[in-house]
Image: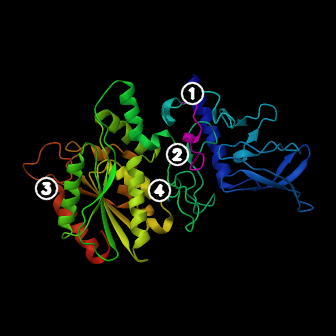
Amino acid sequence: MIFRKILRRKRYSLGRFKLRIAAKKAVCLAFRSGRYLPITDLFGNIVKLVNPDSKKVLESYEYTSFGQESKETLIGNPWRYRGLRTDSVTKLVQCTFRDYSPELQHFLTADPTGYSDGPNLYGYARSNPIAFCDLNGLETMYGPCMCHGLDCEYYTSGKCGHGASITIVDDVPPARNVKVKEWFDYEEHVARQLANQGYKWPVNYSQSLDLQREELPDIGIGFINGVGNSPLEALNSATYVSNIAGGINVHLTYAATNGLIPDNIQAAYNLLGYYATNATKLLYDSWMEYFDTAGPDATYLQVCHSWGAIHVRNALLMCNKKMRKRIYVIAVAPGGYTDKNICGDVVHYINEDSFRDLVPRFDQFGLHMALSQGTVKKVKSLPNEPYFNHSFQSPTYISPLKKSIKKYLKRGKLR
């Protein structure tokens, strides 16, 4: 019965929320002291109140990203942070189902829907209110599109690919992290955990390597590996890509592996939480370094495998719009999918038999998106291949990989 009540309330709330989005923003606020015209910022916060008769600004507000305010309202305006009502006594922001404390930066009650929005039942906007929002206290949604603001038709879905990006305009250097938390330096976190438990074995660290081969003018190629690869195996895969491309240089971003459980935990955080861990930052830095020295028309081909495809998606979300359009992606047996709107172009190669390789089916939302965009190419396992056919250098993928790389080198296109 309780669950049914929650569903009924959620349905009603979402209906109101859709009306709010359809209207874009409130056009007038009325309370005891009078009527006022609100002015909002990109995130829906009311930053000024204007007298409709005199056209003068009567009151202004400033907020931190989590909603902490620097001064009190003097005219009794309860509608401020995110356009929601703030209680004048408790200073709690009243979302539809829960009260949020800007001072504590989390909700005061547990999520009534359970763990559907992540492991933290009290967390607000995945602890990243710049990229996400939670107006009803039930589900985290993409924040305002940084390219189009609240006017973007994909405000709540992030389908345009800009919803999770922190870069606001193209001439400002993009932020380093998709999501800033202690998980950013994941490998140091693993090292501390192992040390605390008395384990002595060393922790692998992600790193950038270079084959030191000849570079093509205005064309860069990179590779990032999947889960379970040693540095030597990743270097071997980068050499494999270089040989397919005719022996030109390949920039390798090695995504370090530290065991099945730590790797899978990190992959889940990368995929579902959009966390930028060590390899993501190194990948982004390698692109920045390349474009800093390359010509204005230079492009970059990023080849990735398995878990590496998630790092590529998150690194692209750290880039500004112009830089994204200069990066092309080839993903082999990907653990996550890249929206074609956040890069120059992308092609995902997956095994047509899901039982022969389950990894590309983990990201069901991403797979559905990629299929609708026509960026998925299904390939059939060749005879005598192992039943679980997930290897980057599997003969199954060599032919389509060669075609895509050669087409890119010749025409600047993947398909």
Q: Which of marks 1 and 3 is nearer the N terminus?
A: 1
Identify the image quadrant of the C terminus: bottom left
Q: Mark 2 points at which residue?
A: 180
Estimate the x, y position of residue 261 in percent, counting from the top left. 32, 33
Q: Is residue 121 above or below residue 364?
A: above
Query: In percent of the image, x 81 and y 32: which residue is there?
Result: 89
Estimate the x, y position of residue 391 in percent, counting from the top left. 19, 49
Q: Are marks 1 and 3 in contact (CB under 8 Å)?
A: no
Q: Distance between the residues labelled 1 and 3?
A: 52 Å
Q: For the residue marked with disc 1, what is the amino acid?
A: Arg
Query: In percent of the image, x 44 and y 48: which residue is there?
Result: 276
Q: Mark 3 points at which residue?
A: 395
Describe residue 58's horizontal placement relative to residue 246 as left or right.
Answer: right
Estimate the x, y position of residue 202 in percent, counting from the top left. 29, 36
Question: Can residue 40 be seen from the camera position used here?
Answer: yes
| Range of magenta residues | 121-132
Q: For the residue marked with disc 4, what is the amino acid?
A: Leu
Q: How far apart are marks 2 and 1 (CA)?
A: 36 Å
